[in-house]
């Protein structure tokens, strides 16, 4: 989600996977930031991407382009849970407007969806290494969206669950964060132009990954699982209210001896029993979890991407939004 600031040409953001596109004319282009925290990839036409690392307030100028029309795409690749970033504008000899795509797809999840440590070559990482090796642009969500020429949102936050965060960490769960454009609990997201045909949800790893603690509100694991299912069903129903025509895909791995997968299946069954007709489940397995802290590697994200592409290719009607 991106929050446009209507008083000046600036976009303030905090969710991962934010991107900006702009065609322009001329031999140079300048990008303006207020962001000492994030990393970006800048694409111009078919050139290899340029890495923009924590630009701060320093303008980034690209010169020496062939005179004529160019296409620019800027992708945020880092996760910034505690910090906002601002991208001001693009200046060149002739700015043009970028047209939105007909297809829209949304990905809701946790660190798997973020692409946490996905470019790492080792499972053991420091906090700084996690930040440096996270590349949301190479996570399964953006890969899938680009394969279908769709606009996308990545509404994901590492460590957060449906009713319980990782290791019972105190803080908003993903459904509690979801309504906001920024992680301030105040800036409500409102974009009438965002009407995704497909919403892919992958939540539960953080709910289940650590044992219930004595001071948790759940008496035991079964109570947690039941609360997870209730919370997940309620979240999907809220999403249905916000997106009356969207098709839901609930995704899960086979971790925790299949417990997560079985609970997700029960969530889908409950939704169908209560009248939901546009919901599927997809389960992935056989990942190497070679990223930081046993998260999906680049190869794993490609596997999940392939699973989604196969499903969406087999069901082109899901893009019809009817």
Image (spheres, helix red, strand yellow):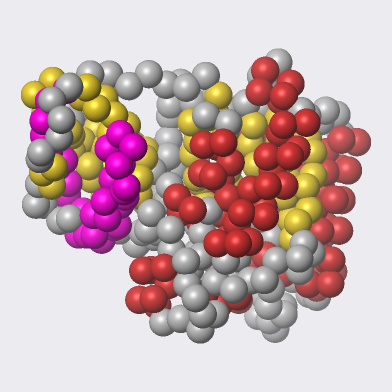
Query: Is residue 202 at all visible to an observer of this figure?
Result: no
* Residue 162 sits in quarter: bottom right
13 relative to 291 in the view: left or right? left
Quadrant, the C terminus = top right
249 displayed left or right of 118:
right
In screen coordinates, is 45 left or right of 261?
left
Q: Residue at horizontal 63%, vertical 61%? A: 300
The residue located at (71%, 33%) in the rendering is 312
| Residue 89 in the image, given as x and y percentages of width and height | 18, 34
Residue 72 lies, in percent from the top left, at 28, 34
Q: Quadrant of residue 197?
A: top right
Q: Nearer the viewer, residue 243 or 49?
A: 49
Q: Position of residue 36 (x, y in %)?
A: 20, 59
Q: Position of residue 269 (x, y in %)?
A: 88, 43
Q: Nearer the viewer, residue 65 or 208?
A: 65
Pick the quarter of the image with the N terminus: top left
Residue at image x 68%, y 81%? 213
Please give the name of the residue rendered at 64% of the width and 67% of the height, measured from the top-left corner.
206
Judged by its main secondary structure, the magenta piece is strand
Segment colored magenta: 25-54
Say if the magenta span includes residue 127.
no
Residue 226 visible in image: yes
Is residue 48 part of the magenta span, yes or no?
A: yes
User: Camera-side residue: 84 or 150?
Assistant: 150
Please tell me which residue lies in front, 251 or 75: 75
Q: In the displayed structure, would residue 238 be above or below residue 17?
A: above
């Amino acid at each position: 989600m991106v929050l446009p600031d209507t008083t000046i040409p600036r976009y303030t953001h905090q969710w991962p996977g934010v991107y900006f596109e702009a065609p322009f004319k001329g031999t140079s282009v300048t990008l303006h930031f207020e962001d000492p925290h994030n990393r970006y990839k800048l694409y111009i036409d078919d050139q290899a991407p340029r890495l923009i690392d924590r630009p701060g307030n320093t303008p980034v100028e690209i010169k020496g382009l062939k005179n004529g029309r160019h296409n620019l795409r800027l992708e945020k690749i880092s996760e910034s849970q505690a910090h906002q970033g601002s991208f001001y504008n693009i200046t060149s000899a002739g700015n043009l407007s970028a047209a939105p795509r007909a297809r829209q797809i949304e990905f809701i999840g946790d660190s798997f969806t973020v692409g946490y440590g996905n470019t790492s070559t080792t499972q053991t990482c420091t906090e700084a290494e996690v930040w440096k090796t996270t590349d949301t642009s190479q996570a399964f969500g953006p890969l899938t969206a680009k394969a279908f020429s769709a606009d996308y949102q990545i509404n994901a936050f590492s460590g957060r669950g449906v009713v319980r965060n990782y290791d019972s960490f105190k803080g908003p769960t993903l459904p509690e964060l979801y309504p906001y454009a920024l992680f301030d609990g105040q800036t409500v997201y409102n974009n009438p132009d965002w009407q995704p045909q497909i919403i892919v949800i992958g939540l539960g790893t953080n709910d289940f990954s650590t044992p219930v603690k004595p001071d948790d509100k759940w008496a035991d694991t079964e109570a947690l699982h039941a609360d997870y299912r209730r919370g997940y069903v309620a979240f999907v129903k809220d999403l249905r209210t916000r997106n009356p025509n969207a098709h839901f895909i609930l995704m899960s791995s086979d971790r925790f001896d299949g417990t997560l997968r079985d609970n997700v299946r029960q969530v889908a069954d409950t939704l169908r029993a209560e009248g939901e007709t546009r919901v599927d489940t997809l389960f992935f397995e056989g990942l190497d979890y070679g990223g930081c802290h046993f998260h999906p590697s680049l190869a794993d994200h490609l596997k999940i991407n392939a699973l989604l592409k196969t499903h969406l290719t087999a069901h082109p009607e899901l893009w019809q939004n009817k």
